[in-house]
Amino acid sequence: MTIQYEIKSQLAKLLATEDLVVEHKKVETASFNIVSRVLTLPMWENTTEDVVDMLVSHEVGHALYTPNEEWYKEYEINPNVVNVVEDARIEKLMKRRYEGISKTFYKGYTELHKEDFFSVKKKDISKLSLADRINLFFKIGSHYRISFTDYEQTLVDRVAACETFQDVLEVSRDIYKYCMEEIEKRKQEQETEQEAGLEMDSGDGQNSGGTGSELEDVKDDWYDEDGNMTEPDEDGSDVESHQVRPEGMSGGGSQMGTGGSEIAETAESLERALKNLAVMEGLENHYLELPDVDTDQIIIDNDVIHSICDAHFTGIRQDYDEKSKVLGSERDWAVYSLDEALKAMVEADKEFLKFKKEAQKEVNYLVKEFEMKKSAGAYARATTSRTGILDTSKLHTYKYNEDLFKKVSIIPDGKNHGLIFVLDWSGSMSREMLDTIKQLYNLIWFCNKVQIPFEVYAFTENFPNVNEEGMAKESYKPRVGLFKVRPGFSLMNIFTSKVRGKNLEKQLINFFRIATAFSDYTANRLVPHGLSLSGTPLNESIVALHKIIPQFRKENSVEKVNCVILTDGEAYQLNYHQEVQRSWDPEPYMGERSIDTSCFLRNRKTGKTYRTGDSWATFTPVLLQDLRDTYPDVNFVGIRIMSPRDLSSFLRINCDDYNSPDIEKHRLSWRKTKALAIKECGYHVYFGLSSAALANDSEFEVEDGATKAQIKRAFTKSLTAKKMNKKILNEFVTMIA
């Protein structure tokens, strides 16, 4: 069966009651790093949910209760024995902590026993070592009647009573000593039998126990000449350490020297069998994190942007005046081009003033709805209390009314609001840029009227954001396991609530001219250097919002932040940093790789992990979901201005099931109002607006002498546009109020 590793990761975190970092990788045994708190689990397959749940619970037990101690320097004990006893202790503590987990361990070990993971079905249990019988007793004791001598039973009781790791070491020492004595007894019995003339195949004339002490031979397998634990052989005969490693790593089983098999055969068998469940082929899981970007290196200040715009537009006028004085056919085209640019500027300015006048009705509607909904919300939270002052108007009712006191309503203060806008400044937005800008301006004027602080950023890769050496600025230090934010990425702070009055209007006019130029090739000279449309670093912008949101909240002292992203929603995935070793280079270098289905986004702050997928359509929603989980009190709104031909792809990308009934509802909404709203698609809500409808004049205007049919069409057109705008604006206001 297929194991859903994301679910098992969440199980591990819940059991640990801490923000453990859980990784499923192609490893044979589990491990836990006490310092970094990273629990690495194998990718178990061909087993049951019960077994996996048991194994996860077991490893969490080691993560919680097994200390990082170099006990082997003080105690000369077979590590298999320590692991057997420690397993019993940590599983007891897990059962005590979570009463319902006893069933998990029972079911899991029952499944392992059925598959003979302990290799005991054809063996006489009574002849196994004490360590083996203790291991079986605490793991599958319900399936066997395991006998112990009186002295052995005292050791079993001590194992059951272990509360600390020190208790484990003390009883492990005694168990180990007892097992070695039993081995010595068997060796003496063999020597006695040999002396009695029993036929023995001794090979080179020596008995099977060797010429030296078997106790010493076994110890030699575990320790080197200096008394340090030996490392596993290259052939894998030694199994990697569980909880007894010096570096504090714990794994899915025990570290066993070859000489320890007589003491803990069952533990060794279990370890080998569990290794066979681990997937070691296919793609390796990669757990990746977002870089902690420095916004100072990314954000281009508002005054820098508009200094460039002002200089550019002033330069067009000056160049026209100078070049128009120059005679000669070679200058004709230059003069004509500047003349067209000046005409486009004049027309854009006229269109801006016209749009501003017409937009006031919608802005005022926004303001009215916002204040009403805000007040309604406040009154819904209002409380009423008695004042203790008699209401004289009610005194005549004293015979049948006990409520004769004046009352006061306490209305709580509303939260301070703030808005962050992110504008897509990519080439795919060229056709819809002007209509998108208009929607943005409506929201900016709304913010000004209700005194809501705001910041507007436009993401780009074309702005010359370079350092003193002329190289693109680095916003973070690359390292393995980080997603890559390309150096050319910038956020242009094109508008801010810190700029008001005539200065703000001048800035609005600047970008209205630029937006006009994108839809009119004759006006392309209106675009300043560095402000042309670029690629789509939407995902980089979402990464940057992790820093921008708390900074904005702190600077403006706002409690409620709303983030609005105006985009066509199509962006390439982020690559991730990976160390690459080339055969001709002595040292590896920091390269990059594309994401695939084995990649996960890991957020250490929230403790959540997300599968990224390998497509651009799934990657951005994952980043948005991570951003939402990081800032659960922030509303994230998407606005897409699109043409009718984009509807199908928009629905296919942002709806979970393209064949669901909701798809038809969205299509119906689009046909009626030329607008739709998709909820929980990365954004809290993603608005789709028709660019054609927005471009139409919503005012009811007809020419003199118009026919009834013409008047009807004009009226219907006006109502449709107003209905669309009011529907979208109402939903938007409801969210932020």
Image (cartoon, rainbow, N blue to C red):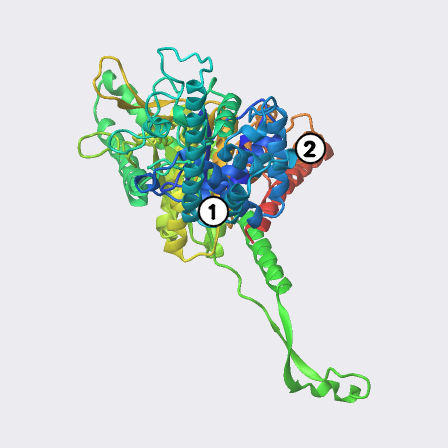
Judge whether residue 588 can be spotted in this image. Answer: yes
Packing grade of label 2 (10 A; few <14, some 14-19, many >=20) is some
Tell me where residue 421 sits by quadrant: top left
Which of the labelled discs sits on residue 18, or is there none?
1
Q: Residue furthest right?
A: 400
Which of the labelled discs sits on residue 728, or is there none?
none
Tell me where residue 297 sits by quadrant: top left
Separation of marks 2 and 1 at Cα, in angstroms = 39 Å
Q: Label 1 amino acid?
A: Glu
Which residue corresponds to mark 2?
A: 662
Residue 133, given in percent of the width and then of the height, sits at 54, 34
Q: Label 2 amino acid?
A: Asp
Q: Residue furthest left?
A: 469
**Between marks 2 and 1 in the image, the one whose residue lies nearer the viewer:** 1
- For image coordinates 63% across by 32% down, the residue present is 110
Q: Earlier in the sequence, mark 2 or mark 1?
A: 1
